[in-house]
Image (cartoon, helix red, strand yellow):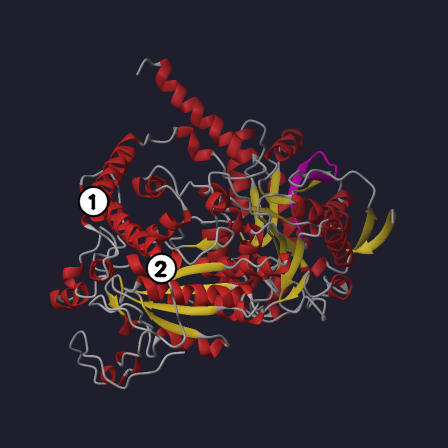
Amino acid sequence: MTVESTAARKPRRSSKRTSAAKTPQTSEPQLVQLLTPEGERVEHPDFEIDLSPDELRGLYRDMVLTRRFDAEATALQRQGELGLWASLLGQEAAQIGSGRALRDDDYVFPTYREHGVAWCRGVDPTNLLGMFRGVNHGGWDPTTNNFHLYTIVIGSQTLHATGYAMGVAKDGADSAVVAYFGDGASSQGDVAEAFTFSAVYNAPVVFFCQNNQWAISEPTEKQMRVPLYQRAQGFGFPGVRVDGNDVLACLAVTRSALERARRGEGPTLVEAFTYRMGAHTTSDDPTKYRADEERAAWEAKDPILRLRTYLEKQDLADAAFFAALEEESETLGKRVREAVRAMPDPDRMAIFDHTYADGNPLVDEERAQFAAYQASFAEEGN
Amino acid sequence: MAAQKLSIAKALNESLRKALETDPKVLIMGEDVGKLGGVFRITDGLQKDFGEDRVIDTPLAESGIVGTAIGLALRGYRPIVEIQFDGFVFPAYDQIVTQLAKMHARALGKIKMPVVIRIPYGGGIGAVEHHSESPEALFAHVAGLKVVSPSNASDAYWMMQQAVQSDDPIIFFEPKRRYWDKGDLDTESIPLPLHKAVVARAGSDLTLAAYGPMVKVCLEAAAAAQEEGKSVEVLDLRSMSPIDFDAVQTSVEKTGRLVVVHEAPVFYGSGAEIAARITERCFYHLEAPVLRVGGYHAPYPPARLEDEYLPGLDRVLDAVDRSLAY
């Protein structure tokens, strides 16, 4: 679907290993792009999109609010309200573009960074914060919004997505499934097995890889020697690399892959070529492993800025729109802040809840012992 | 079909057949489970009768088998997964432990994981490396999983029915060297609850507690001890997680002595858990320390040595004598 460019990309970091210079992934294949970093609309022969001004403003709003939510969560972590946060800063277009391609009856299997996709699914953003605050391990009902719990073990959810998609096909439904994962996860065996199973069973699943260039401190050079999207070919399904900072291209490519799945033509791998502008999580220190210039180069490709430029140039949004959105962002930030601070610790007896669906006498015994132990303090008047 | 005599293998086959007939959401998945009927023929004929959509030959990828079964369960299916041999489960161990076991709790009970993982386990068939292991303690240690093992045809049939109906993930260890042992099966009887232990032979001097493949050895040991005038009770635990400690306690309060027997290594094994709990519960009833008989802290040996490694009649009787000598 894409044409390889022969132009070599400048290596990100010096390496003593001469073989690194030969690694094919350092040549940058041409990305599917519909909106340039300068905010110019361009066409692509395979992927068309025609959005109304309302829809364009909607995508912009989604990205702005998602970034605002993310910034608030990062701040809350710094203030000690959250134990950890995995920021999506820079990946808004990949998530909103792919998320807005989904239908309500599609099903999403995220990693732990898909806050923008959750937003598109209608999951209240405050629900995402419970696990980062330490009051639950997710806690939302995945069936309400067809948005599965965040999965922390890297790549595991790609198999769940594949199995779920196999079930969709068995049911004769025409919905599709999206598995989100990162460039680091693509090194996991589970992801390879998910590719194998989905190809063999022609499962209606879209593998949406956000290649944000860094798996904590490890650059893609430590994960792969060929461009990631090309891996799909070896499994027998198409792979496409899309500009992950271009919300229009992410929407168009994901929509196309979903339609393909719905037609019963099986899986697609979408590699959204993007960049994590922040740290891996708030525990990480990217200054130890990557250069400031790299981030600066990617800031010029900012997904939100380029859509804003386009909206302004085309007179699709006026000052009042941007002002209202700014106010809405602040309201969201305030709501999130207050919701997190008001989040109660769970009841201590919740340790034992839901370990088993059908009960277990051992759990019952330990629950009773724990309750008696706790009650003993009350009796002593402590 | 009412009362009949058939092998554990055939009882499992009949049980899987009934599960497929009863609930259209039940699926069987695994390597070679289709046309071949599994390497032990436990799924023999099922794909022919229920089709490739219900009895699914999978790629050779254990993590993939369990991981996709989790996805199918999320979609409302009830997958029964076959892991070909005990030693092959470890590529799937991550999916079982980090995902399958915890999904229900992580979702605060909103989703269920009705997945059965069948594992032919244990030694005694002269197999090569990785084909004779007993990893049950590794699964019993994990909250969220239930672990069972039948020792006879009737339990094989009924416990499989109950495992399929359970909304919890069940690790179903099948004693492969007993697959061809025949026993009575009444498909119209009312079965025991899945996790209840049962007195397989009543006695008054000592309790032998075992499960799966070792129940038969213990029954033989009890019969041999009887000839020497010792009355040995044999308890078939049937479930390793949860364990029916009440039944063990009842038996030990009667006999005053307990020997736990399993094929798995003794160190950190299920015998250790039973010994600790029963010592706590029955300290004043015990006439002797709880003894354990099992495998050694060594890799499962080559087949020519497995008779030395596996607890046989003599090692069990030796433990009986040691306990009675206190």
Q: Amino acid at mark 2?
A: Gly
Q: Residue A77 at what x, y percent from top left?
A: 22, 43
Q: Residue A348 at what x, y percent from top left?
A: 39, 29
Disc 2 residue crowd, few under 14, some 14–19, many 20+, Cα 10 Å: many
The segment highlighted magenta reads: B198-212
Residue bearing the label numbered 2: A97
Residue B286 shown left or right of residue B143 in the figure: right
* Disc 1 + disc 2, Cβ < 8 Å: no
Residue bearing the label numbered 1: A326
The chain identifier of the residue carrying mark 1 reads A
Disc 1 residue crowd, few under 14, some 14–19, many 20+, Cα 10 Å: some
Residue A228 shown left or right of residue B255 in the figure: left
Q: In the displayed structure, would residue B191 be above or below residue B139?
A: above
Task: Residue at 73%, 36% (x, y): give it.
Answer: B203
Q: Residue furthest left?
A: A292
Q: Does the magenta run of residues contain A111?
A: no
Task: Residue at 43%, 28% (x, y): give it.
Answer: A370
Q: What whole-number distance in Å separates the C-alpha atoms at marks 1 and 2?
A: 21 Å
Q: Nearer the viewer, mark 1 or mark 2?
A: 1
Which quarter of the rendered picture does the N terminus of chain A lie within? bottom left
Residue B199 appears in which quarter of the rendering? Answer: top right
Residue A31 shown left or right of residue B212 in the figure: left
Q: Nearer the viewer, residue A44 or A113?
A: A44
* Residue A345 visible in the shown view: yes
Residue A379 appears in which quarter of the rendering? Answer: top left
Q: Amino acid at mark 1?
A: Glu
Q: Nearer the viewer, residue B210 or A216?
A: A216
Q: In the displayed structure, would residue B158 be above or below residue A364?
A: below
The chain identifier of the residue carrying mark 2 reads A
* Residue B295 visible in the shown view: no
